[in-house]
Image (cartoon, rainbow, N blue to C red):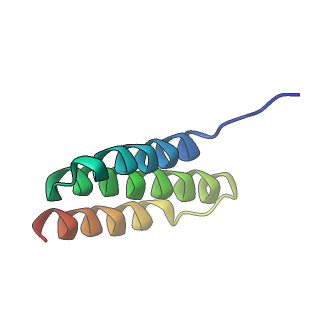
Amino acid sequence: MVITIRPAHFWEWTGNIIRKVLSLVSTGVTIRLATFLEVMGSTIGKALSWGMMGNTTPAVSLLDAMGLIILLDHS
């Protein structure tokens, strides 16, 4: 049995794990870092899956995510 882990899932899981660990520490900056990793992981996953389908929308999605990250950073 072969288990394949897509890079997006890896980053999403990493973000979740980091967030859970850092929630014990609980500071605003560390939660923002975990959220950043989670957003990037899911966005990269969507971009890759859309890219494989031949769509040209990943660039727009990545720009949206960057805007979201900037909002998170300034919150």
Q: Nearer the viewer, residue 68 or 28?
A: 28
What residue is at 83 percent from the left and 28 percent from the top? 2
Q: Nearer the viewer, residue 25 or 36?
A: 25
Query: Residue farthest to the top?
Result: 1
Q: In this view, does 64 lie above or below 23?
A: below
Answer left or right for 33 relative to 42: left
Q: Which of 1 and 18 is in front in this view?
A: 18
Q: Which part of the image, by quadrant, shows the C terminus?
A: bottom left
The picture places residue 24, in percent across and down from the top left corner, at 29, 49
Answer left or right for 14 relative to 73: right
The picture places residue 74, in percent across and down from the top left corner, at 10, 67
The picture places residue 22, in percent across and down from the top left corner, at 29, 46
Q: In this view, does 74 lie above or below 40?
A: below
Query: Residue farthest to the front?
Result: 24
What residue is at 36 percent from the left and 51 percent from the top? 19
The picture places residue 47, in percent across and down from the top left corner, at 53, 56
What residue is at 34 percent from the left and 69 percent from the top? 64
What residue is at 35 percent from the left and 64 percent from the top? 65
Query: Residue farthest to the right?
Result: 1
Q: How many labels does the image show?
A: 0
Answer left or right for 10 relative to 5: left
Answer left or right for 8 relative to 72: right
Q: Which part of the image, by quadrant, shows the N terminus?
A: top right
